[in-house]
Amino acid sequence: MKHLAINQCNTPFKISSDDLNISLSEKRQGNSGVMVLEAVSGQTLLHCFPTKGLSIGQLWYNRQPVFWEAPAGLIPPGQFNPLQEDICINGKVAPGFSFLQTFSGGIELYGLKNWGMPRKDQDGKLLPLHGETSNIPVKEIELWLDNHDLIIVGTFEYRSFIGDETKPWYERGEVLYTVTRTIRLSKAGKMEVSDSIENKTADTLSPDWGYHITFHAEVGAKLLVPSQSAEMRDRQSLPADIETWKPAIRERLRTETGIVHNGLRINDQDGRQLNDVLVTYPNGKGIWVTFSPSPYFQTWFCNGGANSDEFTYTNGEPVFKKPWNGIGIEIGASALDHDGRTDSSVAFNPVLLPGQAVKLVIGVEVLDHDKTLEVEKEITIFNSRNRKTK
């Protein structure tokens, strides 16, 4: 493996080698700027965000987007406070929802005290929506070349966030975890994201991690899940079609549907046991997603909501100027709604001893027509034999 560079995330750079081009540059938004890492390898183009824990922004293959066009922009972490009461839902201040204005990734890691909906801890302290990890910056990026694959590595510290208020919120307090993100990018429309979450304390900890993985949505796109059971997140009756993304009836009206699945099939890949889903498109191509099994899994379909009064700043300005057109999954160590609806069949140890780490893996691969049909057939057969619905 060849070492290419190590670079501070506040210093622009460019690297070119054969058909590999990598750059770190500042993207201006109004009076502020954030750093964006761009990597081009063959027909694969990646954007990721060092200011957001190396969250994956967008991946293109043959000029086609893999992930959604997120409704939120990028905010410098120093201008964001996860506990600031600056968001209203339907005109009422909503503590713990400041995260919404930073919802700008295709793959984002959440947690680590709370990855799901806002809640209070045992001391009565508010734990915000989706936690803090997706808004903690990495300080430096390390680049490697493994044969023809580009390897990008970045690390950040997850702290207690309590203490010296002269420091940015993400630098306050004792270090609880070290998170190391490794991205492997290939020329063939494949990417793997792996996160190592290490307990840096002298105590036993249980990181409450989660992910939002959101794909490009278009009329007729489907999200296929090989699972043994499915039920609506809101416990209403399942609609006849729980796989197809549909556009909003009115652009300003946002519609969100969540479906909780249990008993996902297990795939053995390179000695690892992974779950998988498939996103298919009307042109016959697909996106195959593999990921570490987790106690909680739900599909997520969303549309509309541009310039809506549903989510506004306290001055009445809409938070989202773009529609929430996305199709994807949410996975996590606990139930998103703290209602206990997790999959007991998943082998899962929530505890990390001092110095221990958990490694989580997400693979994304763009498939051609034939491979898409093959995976789709496998999922159809699995569900016809195993699926129960509620």
Image (cartoon, rainbow, N blue to C red):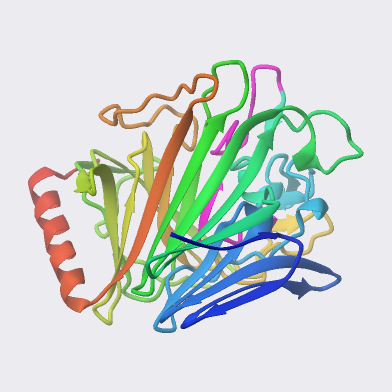
Quadrant of the image containing the N terminus = bottom left
Q: Where is residue 203 in the image (x, y as percent from the top left)?
A: 59, 15
Classify residue 123 as left or right of residue 104: right
Report the residue at 39% width, 83% height from top.
62
Quarter of the image for residue 279 reads bottom left
> What residue sits 29% from the left and 31% below the top?
346
When the figure is inspected, residue 96 is found, relative to residue 47, above or below; the finding is: above
Task: Give the side of residue 251 with respect to residue 159, left or right.
Answer: left
Quadrant, the C terminus: top left
Q: Is residue 166 above or below residue 245?
A: above
Pick whichever, 238 or 244, lies toward us. 244
Q: Which residue lies furthest to the front in this view?
A: 2
Q: In which quarter of the image is residue 205?
A: top right
**Membership of 86 in magenta stretch:** no
Q: Give the range drawn in magenta.
A: 101-124
Residue at x 31%, y 74% (from the top left corner): 220
Residue drawn at point x = 87 percent, y = 40 percent: 167
Q: Is residue 243 something one can see in this rendering?
A: no
Dominant SS of magenta comes to loop
**Between 25 and 86, the one nearer to me in the picture:** 25
Q: Position of residue 388 (x, y in %)?
A: 17, 42
